[in-house]
Image (cartoon, grey):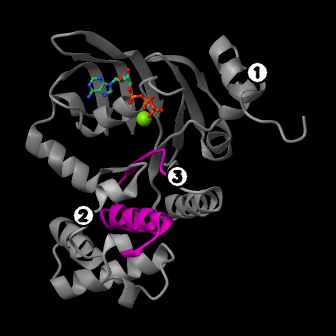
Amino acid sequence: MLSVRDLNITFSSQANIVHAVKGISYELEEGQTLGIVGESGSGKTVSGLALMGLLPPTASVTGEILFQEEDILQAEKKRLQKLRGSEIALIFQNPLAALNPVFTVANQMIETICLHHNVTKIEARERAIALLDRVKITEPHKRIDDYPHQFSLGMCQRIMIAMTLSMKPKLLIADEPTASLDVTTQKEILELMDELKEEYRMSMIFISHDLGVVLERCDKVLVMYLGNIVEQGHPKEIFLNPKDDYTKRLIDAIPKINA
Ligand SMILES: Nc1ncnc2c1ncn2[C@@H]1O[C@H](COP(=O)(O)OP(=O)(O)OP(=O)(O)O)[C@@H](O)[C@H]1O
Ligand SMILES: [Mg+2]
């Protein structure tokens, strides 16, 4: 469903040029989960943003991103907006940055649902409540009228996930979706995402620093280092038999409980 060919991303300013992604290629099959791991600054986020056409104007991008046989890099602005609303969705690290603090959850969810579906406000509210219930917000019919600051960070991430699901995307890009959460909440959110992925039959790109998290849920993993893919393949094979020195170091950095 997704085929990335020789993707290059550079940022130029008057002061310097940053070559953030250096000719990466990979494929993602329908229904599969692709993990992207690598240290900070290796190009994980920008390569995800490129799939959504969300890079800033200072970025120049070359190569090919075929999503369901359509080249995203050639798509018009309007088409990209449509794709972002209905086919490809993104969940960020910090849910508070994505929720608007001055509107209730109901306002924001109803607006999103009405934008993407031909429903009345009353129907949209019902849908929103059902989605909040699905992501395990208790008493959703009451909580829906609260503001984002009235929820914990983990709950805000659930709300973001509910909003994303309202669009029924075919591809979900999750960029360190649990990085801002405590360990227990991280586990809950990851479990929820695993359930929803099955239920909604989404393909997923899962960006993470955490090789362990990727190992558990990905069909394939890309190891990125300084804008390159240094290794890609089945997570277990890469984990047990890393070919690249950088991958070896990444694995060595994981604390071993029963070393
Ligand atoms: N808007 C931008 N302007 C200039 N350079 C940028 C911009 N966004 C990202 N970069 C640069 O591109 C490179 C890749 O950044 P990216 O955010 O993709 O890293 P990352 O792998 O997601 O890191 P992290 O794990 O910290 O999130 C970095 O060198 C970064 O400084
Ligand atoms: Mg990032």
Left or right of residue 14, residue 71 in this image: right
Where residue 97 appears, x then y in whole percent?
A: 31, 54
Which badge, 2 or 1, is on the more N-terminal residue?
Answer: 2
Q: Which residue is mark 3?
A: 178
Q: Is mark 1 within 8 Å of ligand 1?
A: no
Name the residue at 44% across, 24% down. Answer: 41
Image quadrant where residue 175 sits = top left
Image quadrant where residue 139 sits = bottom left
Query: Considering depth in this image, is 144 or 130 the residue closer to the camera?
Result: 144
Left or right of residue 11, residue 26 in this image: right
**From the viewer's perspective, is the residue at label 3 or at label 1 nearer?**
3
Element carrying mark 3:
loop
Where residue 252 appears, x then y in whole percent?
A: 75, 25
Task: For label 2, count other residues whose C-alpha is less than 10 Å away and answer few (under 14), some (14-19) or many (20+).
Answer: some
Is residue 131 positioned above or below 2 on the image?
below
Is residue 14 positioned above or below 200 on the image?
above
Q: Is mark 3 within 8 Å of ligand 2?
A: no
Q: Magenta part of the protein: which range?
A: 150-178
Q: In which quadrant of this rendering is ligand 2 seen?
A: top left
Mark 1 residue type = Asn
Residue 241 is marked as 1
Q: In this orientation, does residue 69 appear?
A: no
Q: In this orientation, does residue 187 appear?
A: yes
Element carrying mark 1:
loop
Where residue 73 appears, x then y in whole percent?
A: 21, 28
Mark 3 residue type = Thr
Which badge, 3 or 2, is on the more N-terminal residue?
Answer: 2
Query: Considering depth in this image, is 143 or 193 the residue closer to the camera?
Result: 143
**From the viewer's perspective, is the residue at label 2 or at label 1 nearer?**
2
Q: Is mark 2 within 8 Å of ligand 1?
A: no
Where residue 75 appears, x then y in whole percent?
A: 15, 34
Residue 100 is marked as 2
